[in-house]
Amino acid sequence: QVQLVESGGGLVQAGGSLRLSCVASGRTFSNYAMGWFRQAPGKEREFVATIRWNVVSTYYGDSVKGRFTISRDDAKNTVYLQMNSLKPEDTAVYYCAARRFVTSTKAHEYDYWGQGTHVTVSS
């Protein structure tokens, strides 16, 4: 079992930045690929970014490419999402997720989820 706890959400003006953190516990964190997803009210959960267990590969959703950066610190069992140049359409609940080894852009392929952290971007 893997437990995930996100933090770092909040209210920010358009053009601003936030860094989300997700701390994992329960299993060997370095064996897991980590992903960030988001869900806005009335919309489906959307893939944001993912990073492979050995940090070799990262992938991003088209809507965040060039603005968001995913990274991980296995010594701290933490994955980060640095969000720059935020837009009102980035407003959503952001979720951290984990699955063994291989990355995926599909939410249903992740085994563990955090409770989410709210991000609101004002115009």
Image: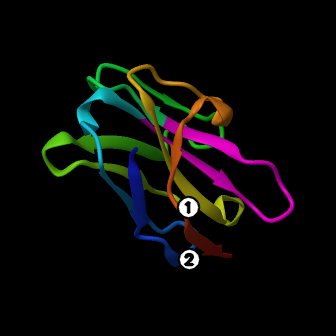
Q: Residues within 10 Å of mark 2 (few under 14, many from 20)?
A: some
Circles 1 and 2: CB atoms closer than 8 Å: yes
Residue that badge 2 annotates: 13
- Name which of mark 1 and mark 2 comes first in the sequence: 2
Residue that badge 1 annotates: 86
Q: Quadrant of the N terminus?
A: top left
Query: Considering only vertical position in the picture, is 56 above or below 45?
Result: above
Q: Secondary structure at mark 1?
A: loop
As shown in the figure, which amino acid type bears the numbered disc 2?
Gln
Q: Is residue 5 visible?
A: yes
Which quarter of the picture shows residue 107? top right
Q: Quadrant of the C terminus?
A: bottom right
**Dominant secondary structure of the residues highlighted in magenta in the image:** strand
Name the spot of residue 44 as percent of width and height, x first: 80, 48
As shown in the figure, which amino acid type bears the numbered disc 1?
Leu
Report the span colored magenta.
Answer: 34-49
How many badges with numbers are in the image? 2
Q: Is residue 38 magenta?
A: yes
Q: Is residue 87 visible?
A: no
In the displayed structure image, the side of residue 5 where residue 42 appears, left or right: right
Q: Residue furthest left?
A: 75
Q: Nearer the viewer, residue 87 or 42?
A: 42
**Residue drawn where x is 74% and y is 61% of the image:** 40
Instruction: Give the Cα separation between the discs numbered 1 and 2.
Output: 8 Å
Q: Residues within 10 Å of mark 1 (few under 14, many from 20)?
A: many
**Residue drawn where x is 39% and y is 42% of the image:** 70
Name the spot of residue 68 as percent of width and height, x first: 47, 46
